[in-house]
Image (cartoon, helix red, strand yellow):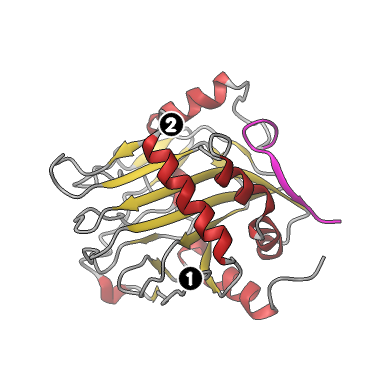
Amino acid sequence: MKQLLNKDEISNFKRDGAVLIKGKFAKEWIEGLRRGIDEDIKNPSPRFVRHTIDENAPGYYEDFWTWDLYKDFKEFVFNSPTAKIASELLGAKKINLVMDNWFFREAGSKSGAPFHHDISYFDFEGSMCVLWLPLEPVTKKEGIAWVKGSHLWDKLFIRTRFQEGHPVDHQAGVVNGKNYDITPDILNNKDDYEFLQWDLELGDCVFFDMRTLHGSLSQVIPKKDVHRYTLRMAKEGAMVEYRGDWALDERMMMEANGYQNGDDLSGKMFPTLYKNQ
């Protein structure tokens, strides 16, 4: 199969922890994902959440692990270029789905994403990357910022909630044999970090390492509705690794499907999306 990325894109991903990739998703993919989000909002999964507390204010919504519930999501997960791109970035022989996720902000919503990294949110460990795909054009001020090189810090940060106030799930310290820190106060110390931000046209995306810190840097209030779709994917060798009690709800779902600590990220919940021929 034809190589989708050039050497610079792959080296930038490895060095910086995030990379802009231009024009890989046709309009049909974008439209399908927007249909899927609309359908999900009308008929949400048990994991659907509104992060905005004030019910009268414009909302910030999220749902995840929905790829097998809505046909447009399933079509994208299995047939879009996403998994092939992930294999090239990770140097993988095989790519398995870890989790799909979407976010929807209504025009005027003051809620936003805290700075965080995905690796410590759930019971996953291994070489993993994330697709961040906006479903409308976005300027760098409106989008997400990534802390350049933070995937190489060899640190784990406690999960920060997306709900208003961004509460932290645990105190810093050792949990299940690993040390967790509180995410640094990036917004009040911007000069201490180098950020990656891009203007994205429709069909552009960002891929980033699961360990790269990222969040809303400018806190821009959108004038139009905002749709974001993400996929977390793993290279061969990734596994279930129990983290803190903050991941208990997701852990219970995995255990109900037969997964235990140390199991491979494969099978029913983590299907194979790509194999290198």
The residue lying at 49 percent from left, 27 percent from top is 251
Q: Position of residue 38 (x, y in %)?
A: 41, 45
Which residue is denoted by mark 1 in the rendering? 202
Tell me which amino acid carries mark 2.
Ser
- Say which of 99 and 16 sits in front: 99
- Residue lying at 62% horizontally and 76% vertically, measured from the top left: 9
Q: Position of residue 275 (x, y in %)?
A: 79, 51
**Which of the image's four quarters has the C terminus?**
bottom right
Q: Amino acid at mark 1?
A: Leu
Q: Quadrant of residue 27?
A: bottom right
Rounded to the nearest angstrom, the CA distance separating label 1 from label 2 is 27 Å
Q: Residues within 10 Å of mark 2 (few under 14, many from 20)?
A: some
Is residue 173 left or right of 11 when viewed as pictured? left
Task: Identify the residue at image location x=39%, y=61%.
Answer: 214
Question: Circle 2 is placed at which residue position?
Answer: 45
* Residue at the far bottom in the pictured view: 8
Q: Quadrant of the N terminus?
A: bottom right
